[in-house]
Image: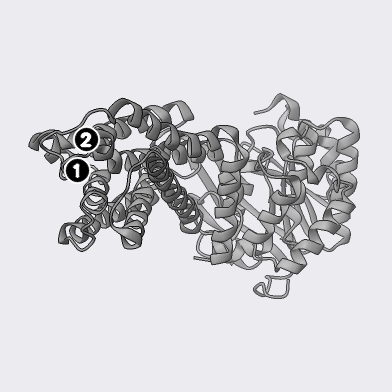
Amino acid sequence: MDNARALQNGNVIVIKDLVKNFEEIKAVNGLNLEIRKGEMFGFLGPNGAGKTTTINMLCGLLEPTAGTATVAGYDVTKEATKMKEYIGVCPQEAAVFKFLSGRENIELLGNLHGVQKEILRERTTSLLADADFTEAAKRRAKGYSGGMMRQLNLLMALISDPEIVFLDEPTVGMDARARRRTWEYIGSLKDQGKTVILTTHYIEEAQALSDRVGIIDYGKLIALGTPDALMAEHEAQDLEAVFLKITGRRIAEGS
Amino acid sequence: MNLRQIGALVIVELKKLYRDPMSLTVMVLMPVGLALIFYFALSGITDNDYYPVPGMNHFEYLLPGVMGYAVIYMGMMIALALVEYRQSGLLKRVETTPVSPSTYLGSHIIANMLIAVFQGLIVLLVARVLGYEPLGGLVGLLLAALFLALLGISAAGLGLITAAVAKNSGAASGLAVIYIVPMMMFGSLLAVFNETTRNIARFMPNYYLSDSLSIIFHKGNVSDPVILQNLLILASITLVIVFAGIQLFKRAGNR
């Protein structure tokens, strides 16, 4: 993080008393959290628990009702434009320009992030080769399958070589094989030293990928720790059982 | 505003036009079709006493208005594009990059301005092929391009307002008709008939284009002070519409 602000105790994300209300609904309710540089952090919780709302606030898409958050040392509300130089976001919906080719979509995001022309060309080629997407990227996204759209969605988030990557339900709608392959790819991001924040409602995904997991329910962080520590603490065999023991509900049942 | 970001986004909008059959049809065939329809319907009508030049036909008389008519539809096109981008998550995706909302909306406005000039000049070109000889020379042509560019920016501003208010593409189309029809009827066509309609037309931005291009192309008087006066009025209206459009669209956010 060459040009980012000095980090607080090595934390790239610092969230203090974060609140987001949508009229009467408290989508995020007093969240406190710190995420360390190079960490793979999983936000786990049922649909509607507040995971995406939290991510949207951290990416500068939503203004918090109360509380503060810094990403890469920058306040997400007051210094959003600067903060966005350090992040890559893979949104939940496959947000791609269908009339552009896969390569053009990736290069567009690179241009918007200000990646130098020469570097952009090389990096796009390398990203596509690593993801085995070179041939597909020559075609317009209009003809892509749902899985290919999601793969492109992920590659677009990585073209700026961001220090911090937000992945919002990156494998929703993928078949088991594509999901495994995407997990491997996400795992490789950690090897590159990136901080990855992943939201998911798949237990297996959170368990397989995350160094630490934050379980969120009704906008509150109800458990935090490594998957092994959480399972040991609650004498549970997986994170689903952890959630069940804490809330009396299964994650799939929702809130 | 970052020129590279604007350039990349303008290119995307232009690619969308020439790669999407529907958009391409609207962009090229509509002005050609309009010119042909008006030619075949009205070129046989001649010698009305309100013509500024004796001997002209009604098609020639209305031609400046038809040029503006081709441009005002762009308001609906930009509204539909922005609503679609919002619904597909593309606006959110762009918002996660360091691109400011003004840069993003500015790129739409610039793309629209270029298209407006192109469309207006297509009408003029078709009229030329059909035998119309516009006066005013190169200066007249440049002035026409300037008026078309301003009207294109106005139309883009109206598109932003429409997209800010409309929740979906159906609503956007319906709302656009509310301003397109009066602009078409008063600003382009009926304003010529009596003082009442002319007074109503003064509230329509395309009236100032129709009026000025009539002076330029029919009389060849490029230094007529009315042209400068119209230019200033159109520029002021454009400024107000675009400012309102950007503010409303920013406020509406991603909904």
> Between disc 1 and disc 2, whose residue precedes?
2
Q: Is residue B241 left or right of residue B85?
A: left
> Which of the pair A129/A231 is nearer the observer?
A129
Q: Residue at x 70, y 49 (%)?
A: A105
Q: Quadrant of residue B144?
A: bottom left
Residue B7 at x, y = what percent?
56, 60
Q: Residues within 10 Å of mark 1 (few under 14, many from 20)?
A: some
Left or right of residue B2: residue B198: left
Which residue, given by chain and number where applicable, does mark 2 sit on?
Answer: B186
- Please determine whether, in this image, residue A252 is positioned above or below residue A214: above
Q: Would residue A96 be seen by someone viewing this image from the given angle?
A: yes
Q: Is residue A43 visible?
A: no
Locate residue B111, reporting x and y percent. 49, 51
Determine whether, in the image, residue A33 is placed left or right of residue A28. Answer: right
Three-letter amino acid code of the residue under disc 1: Phe
Does the residue at mark 1 contact the one at mark 2 (Cβ under 8 Å)? yes
Q: Nearer the viewer, residue B22 or B51?
A: B51
> Residue A120: percent from the left, percent from the top?
75, 63
Query: For the view shown, which residue lies furthest in the left direction?
Result: B195
Label 1 resides on the chain identified as B
- Residue A10 horizontal/vertical position (percent): 74, 69
Query: To which residue does mark 1 refer?
Result: B203
**Mark 2 residue crowding within 10 angstroms, few (<14) / some (14–19) / many (20+):** many
Image quadrant in which you'd find residue A148: top right
Q: Could you tell me which residue is drawn at 57 percent across and 52 percent down?
A: B95
Q: Which element carries disc 2, helix, strand or loop?
A: helix
Identity, as a three-letter code, of the amino acid under mark 2: Phe
